[in-house]
Image: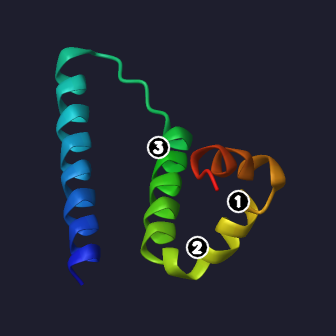
Amino acid sequence: VYYWGGFLAWGLRMAAWCKKRRQQAEKSSTEVVSRPALVLAGIGVVGFGLVAAGFGSAWREPAEELLYGYALTRIPDLLTYPS
């Protein structure tokens, strides 16, 4: 609960910062360039990251097998743990 609460608080703070920054840009310039595709893409990436972080226990094992299952990635382990 605290984990998701922290993400929610961070997200709300980021939204408030973006709103304030947009208002300042409107005051300082007469022509504001709106990029809704970039905004939506950014929101999508952040949303995906938050969901992935929240459910990390579900994908941790497959990710470890993908990243550490190759012989090339085991070379540093051989160098750091002498037998």
Q: Secondary structure at mark 2?
A: helix
Q: Amino acid at mark 2?
A: Arg
Count up the numbered dots: 3
Q: Nearer the viewer, residue 73 or 66?
A: 73
Mark 3 residue type: Val
Q: Residues within 10 Å of mark 3 (few under 14, many from 20)?
A: few
Say whether residue 77 is left or right of residue 9.
Answer: right
Cα distance in 3D space between marks 3 and 1: 34 Å
Residue 17: numbered disc:
none
**Which marked residue is nearer to the observer: mark 2 or mark 3?**
2
Q: Are marks 2 and 1 in contact (CB under 8 Å)?
A: no
Q: Earlier in the sequence, mark 2 or mark 3?
A: 3
Residue 18 in percent (x, y) is at 26, 41
Is there a contact, CB below 8 Å, between mark 2 and mark 3? no
Residue bearing mark 2:
60
Residue at coordinates 65% horizontally, 43% vertically from top-left?
79
Q: Nearer the viewer, residue 10 or 67?
A: 67
The numbered disc on residue 39 is 3
What's the residue at 55%, 47% (across, down)? 41
The x and y percentages for residue 4 are: 29, 75
Q: CA distance from mark 2 to mark 3?
A: 29 Å
Foreground label between 2 and 1: 1
Could you say where residue 27 lies in the image, as x and y percent from the top left? Answer: 17, 22
Nearer to the camera, 66 or 12: 66
Amino acid of disc 1: Tyr
> Which residue lies under the disc numbered 1?
68
Q: Is residue 40 above or below residue 69?
A: above
